[in-house]
DNA sequence: TAATTTTTGCACTAATGTTGCAATTAATTT
DNA sequence: AAATTAATTGCAACATTAGTGCAAAAATTA
């Protein structure tokens, strides 16, 4: 089984308390996390800036990915599949529950193909579905 | 042809300078606009707060819609179709060009259906594709 | 374990969004 | 068309969220 240090080393990152703890949080959370969630769940053990930088680093290294939202917040979730550094394979659908506000990665649901107009070149596609999640139903 | 005052009146809004000007901006822009773009393009003729409130009002009235992004900004675009107050029919795909950073509404491309896992109820689905737009190709 | 590199936390700065309230402007009524 | 009423605007103050430089601390390397 992969431990946090393994994952960090694999990405060429030094193993530090903050990185281990924050990665831990992602590993034990099935939904997505916002910066604020992380601060809450670490009881502010780390500086705000450290959290920002850790999230940035994780995104760059392909450990987590960002989820688009319409409410001016960035949500982050673990990359479950093989994301290489600087290149994400984040092709699953994200679900935001309008009742409990949780953001869930639907790893089984892949983003369907779309036909773009001529001369548009697709690099990535993200899909966000809002509705009621299984727990709130 | 529909003028800005018409559109505003139709939504039950008083016709004011700021609303006319901001609506104008949307009408003459094919892409999406962020709060900052609007401030730039109106040469700060209106207070920051007025712009915020105008955008909010327009969203509530179904004149514009918000586009999800991963970069902690909200983009707004005209609702081309029949959006009623408080209920958007915003089922088209949005395209963000990674070269020129423009956000474009692909009105012809509708968001494909997705099958959600059992017990998930869909309310809305948004899709954002990033890549190279026709102008940058 | 010492030297080097990286990361962290602090202080400061900047950008972004919100609220109350008086002044202004638009709509309504007479 | 003027007066009344209702809605909107702008200012000031505040709150939140994010970014940067740099010295101290921790992690990695030698």
Image (spheres, coloured by chain):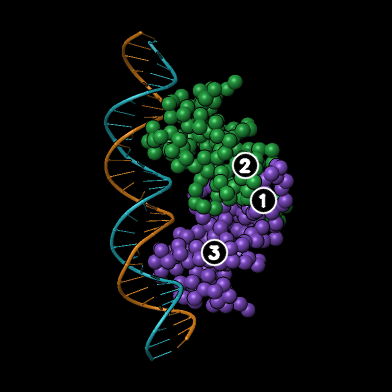
Chain colours: A purple, B green, C cyan, D orange
Q: Which residue is mark 3?
A: A60
Going 57% across and 49% down the picture, which residue do you hit? B99
Is any part of residue B87 visible from this angle? no
Q: Residue at x 51, y 29 (%)?
A: B24
What secondary structure is marked by label 1? strand
Tell me the mark number nearer the camera, choosing from 2 and 1: 2
Figure check: A29 above or below A68: below
Q: Position of residue C14 (x, y in %)?
A: 36, 51
- Is A52 situated left or right of B11 in this image? left
**Residue B80: quadrant of the picture:** top right
Mark 2–mark 1 CB contact (< 8 Å)? no
Q: Chain of mark 3?
A: A
Badge 2 element:
loop
The disc, 1 or 3, on the residue closer to the chain's N-terminal end is 3
- Which residue sits at x=58%, y=35%? B30
Front-most of residues A31 and D19: D19
**Residue at image mark 2:** B135
Q: Position of residue D28 (x, y in %)?
A: 49, 80
User: Do the residues under discs 2 and 3 have CB atoms within 8 angstroms?
Assistant: no
Task: Report how far apart the C-alphas of labels 2 and 1 lie in the structure.
Answer: 14 Å
Image disc number at residue A122 = 1
Q: Quadrant of the N terminus of chain B?
A: top right
CA–CA distance between discs 1 and 3? 20 Å
Chain of residue at mark 1: A
Looking at the picture, does residue B87 appear above or below residue D30?
A: above
Q: Secondary structure at mark 3?
A: helix
| Between marks 2 and 3 in the image, the one whose residue lies nearer the viewer | 2
């Amino acid at each position: 089984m992969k431990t946090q240090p393994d994952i960090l080393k694999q990405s060429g990152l030094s193993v530090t308390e903050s990185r281990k703890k924050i990665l831990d949080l992602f590993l034990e959370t099935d939904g997505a996390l916002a910066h604020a969630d992380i601060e809450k769940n670490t009881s502010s053990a780390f500086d705000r800036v450290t959290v920002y930088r850790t999230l940035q680093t994780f995104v760059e290294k392909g450990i987590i990915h960002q989820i688009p939202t319409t409410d001016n917040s960035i949500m982050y979730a673990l990359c479950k599949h093989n994301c290489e550094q600087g290149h994400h394979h984040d092709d699953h659908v994200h679900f935001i529950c309008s009742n409990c506000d949780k953001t869930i990665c639907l790893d089984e649901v892949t983003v369907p193909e779309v036909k773009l107009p001529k001369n548009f070149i697709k690099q990535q596609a993200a899909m966000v579905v809002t509705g009621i999640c299984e727990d709130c139903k």
